Amino acid sequence: MTILDKIASQFNIKISDVSNFVGIEIWKNDISGDIILTQKYLIHKLLEDFNMSDCKSSNAPMQPNLKLTSADESKSDIPYRQLIGCLLFISRTTRPVWIG
């Protein structure tokens, strides 16, 4: 008797393939057996929340020869702690793993 059988004997449950778990989309390729985890929805929502939906990608993390200002001179209203927290959550919950 499996654990699911034991749970089903006590509760009315429906067993099916999972496609979404805690905001992580799960895709399974039946032919190759690969499982793909993605957080596209969360990433798009994060871009919308921080008004970056129209941003353009870049190969470099910042512009060359960019003149930086100190933190007290900056007049930005961007909630950096919230943004960094969201990015850390995304990077830690779905990590790329290749098995070759």
Image: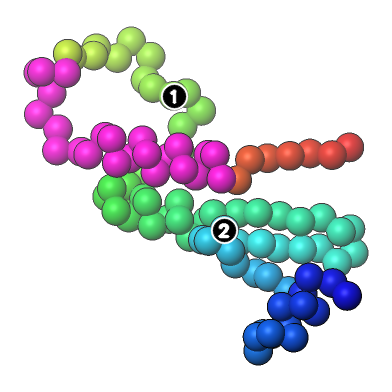
> Picture coordinates of residue 22 (x, y %)?
53, 61
Tell me the quarter of the image containing the N terminus: bottom right
Q: Is residue 41 left or right of residue 9?
A: left
Q: Residue at x 17, y 13 (%)?
A: 70
Does the stretch in magenta take in 39? no
Task: Give the quadrant of residue 73.
Answer: top left
Which amino acid, by three-letter code, is at mark 1?
Pro
Q: Which residue is mark 2?
A: 24
Camera-side residue: 22 or 44?
22
Camera-side residue: 18 or 27?
18
Camera-side residue: 68 or 96?
96
The local secondary structure at tag 1 comes to loop
Q: Residue at x 45, y 56 (%)?
A: 42
Figure check: 90 above or below 59: below
Q: Which residue is mark 1?
A: 61
Q: Which residues are magenta?
A: 71-93
Q: Residue at x 10, y 18 (%)?
A: 72
Which amino acid, by three-letter code, is at mark 2?
Ile
Secondary structure mostly seen in the magenta stretch: helix
